[in-house]
Amino acid sequence: MFIFITTFQLMMSSCVILQVSLSNLEKLGLFIFYELKEIWHHRLQNDSFSNLRILIVHSCGSLLNIIPCHLIQSFKNLKEIKVRTCLNLKHVFDLQGCDTYGEILPKLEILQLYDLKKLKGIIICNNEENGDTRGLFSPSMPMTFQNFKCLSIDCCGEEVEVFFGEKVSFSNLEELRLGHLSMLKKIWHPQHKFSDKLRILTVGSCPRLANLIPSHLIHSFQHLKELYVYDCEVLEYVFDHQGLNRDDGILPKIEILKLEELPKLRLTFYYDKNDNMPYHSSLFKFTALEHIKEIHITNCGNPLDEKVSFSPNLEVLVLKRFSKLKKIDFGTEPKLRKLVLNNIPELSNIQSNGDENASKTCLLSSSTFKNFHNLEKWEIINCGMKDRSDVYSY
C-alpha cells in the first residue's frame, strides 16, 4: 500500500524498515534505532521518495549505509543530509551495482557527518570493498556534485589519511569544515581540482596534517572569506607556495583569519626558483590582505618576525605568545575596534600613521593612541615590560 501525504514530517523511535512509498514526504528523521540495519526496503519503487528534501539519521548503531544504489536516483530533490553517531556505518552512499555514476543527488546542498568512527568512505563504487579505503571522499569513478554548498565532517573515519580524491568534483562548494580526523595527512589529492567558490574553511584537531593549502590549489581560494585552523600539532604551513612566484597573491578576499594552537606553524612558504632556497614567514605580508577584518593568532610557534604590519582596514587583532615580535604597525587611519596582546615579552612599540618617533618609554604613546578612533576594547598583558616605565603614556 502506498501512502501519499503532503508536507509530512515522520519521526520514528522504534526499529522499522520503510516498506511504503511516501512520494510527498519532505523531511525524514530516524533517531535511536540500535538494531536497524537498512532504512529502505529493496523493493521500493524509484519514485518512492522523490520529494524528500531533508534526511536526518541519529544513533542507528547497526546501519552500514544510508542510501543504497537502487534508490540513489529517487532522491532527486534531496537538499540536506545529516548523519550522527552511527557507530558501524561504513559508507553514506553505496553505489555498488550501479551502471552509471556521473552526477548524483543533483540538488544536494548540505552534508553533515559526525561521530562515524568506522566510516571508510562517503561513497563506495564497484570493486572497492577490498581496495584502498584511506580516502574518505575518493570514489573510483568520476563523480560530480553540482549544487553542493556545505560539507562538514567531524570525528569520522579513524583510518582516513586523505580526504578528497582526484575523481570527485564540487563546482559550487562554499563551506568546508573538517575536525577530529586523527589520521588525516592530506586534504587534497595532488590532481584534485577544487571549487573556486569556497568562502569558509575550518580545519581542526588533525594531529598529522602538515600542510593545509598546497601550491596547485592556492588560486582556487580567490573567494575565501573565513579561514579557521586550530589544534593541528604538526602543521607547518597554511599556504605552500613552492614553485610559485613570490608576488603571486593569496586570499585576496579574506576577511577573518584564525590560527590557534599550532605549535609548529611557520605561517607560509615561498620558493625561490633561482637559488632553490626556501623562504618562510618573513615574506608574508598582512598588508596585502586588503579586506581583512579579523586576525587571531594564538599559541602558534613563532610565525611572525620582529616587525609586523597590518592593513588599516583591520578591526580585530588578537596575538598571544610571540617571543620575537617587537613592533606592530597598523598603517594610516586604522579602523581597529578590538586589540588583545598577551605574552609578547619583546614587544617595544605599537604605532600607526608611520609614527617612527613614538615614545621609547612605553608601548603605546598618546599620539599613537589618538589615531585609534574606533577602539572599543584593548587588553595588553605581559607585553614588553622589560626595562619599560609603562604601557601607555599620556
Image (cartoon, grey):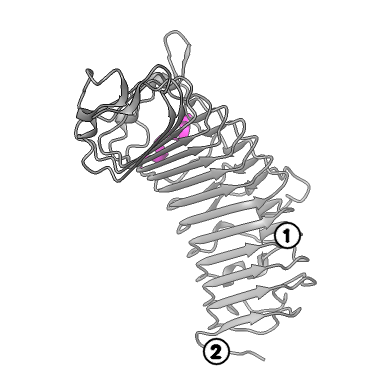
User: Which residue position is annotated with label 1?
Assistant: 89
**Foreground disc of the pair 1, 2:** 1
Closer to the camera in the image, 216 or 250: 250
- The residue lying at 65 percent from left, 34 percent from top is 208
Quarter of the figure that contains the N terminus: bottom right
Q: Main secondary structure of the magenta part?
A: helix
Position of residue 129 relative to residue 244, above or below, is below
Q: Amino acid at mark 2?
A: Ile
Q: Percent from the top left, x then y, of residue 373?
A: 21, 41
Closer to the camera in the image, 390 or 276: 390
SS at circle 2 = loop
Q: Percent from the top left, x then y, of residue 108?
A: 50, 63
Closer to the camera in the image, 245 or 253: 253
Tag 1 and tag 2, C-beta contact below 8 Å: no
Magenta residues, start to end = 215-222
Say left or right for 299 vs 91. Answer: left
- The residue lying at 49 percent from left, 56 percent from top is 150
- The residue lying at 43 percent from left, 19 percent from top is 386
Q: Is residue 267 magenta?
A: no
- The residue lying at 71 percent from left, 78 percent from top is 43
Position of residue 296 relative to residue 14, above or below, is above
The quadrant holding residue 273 is top left
Q: Amino acid at mark 1?
A: Leu
The quadrant holding residue 291 is top left
Circle 2 packing at 10 Å, graded few (<14), some (14-19), many (20+), is few
Q: Percent from the top left, x then y, of residue 90?
A: 73, 56
Say left or right for 6 vs 370. Answer: right
SS at circle 1 = loop
Circle 1 packing at 10 Å, graded few (<14), some (14-19), many (20+), is many
The quadrant holding residue 339 is top left
User: Which residue position is annotated with label 2?
Assistant: 5
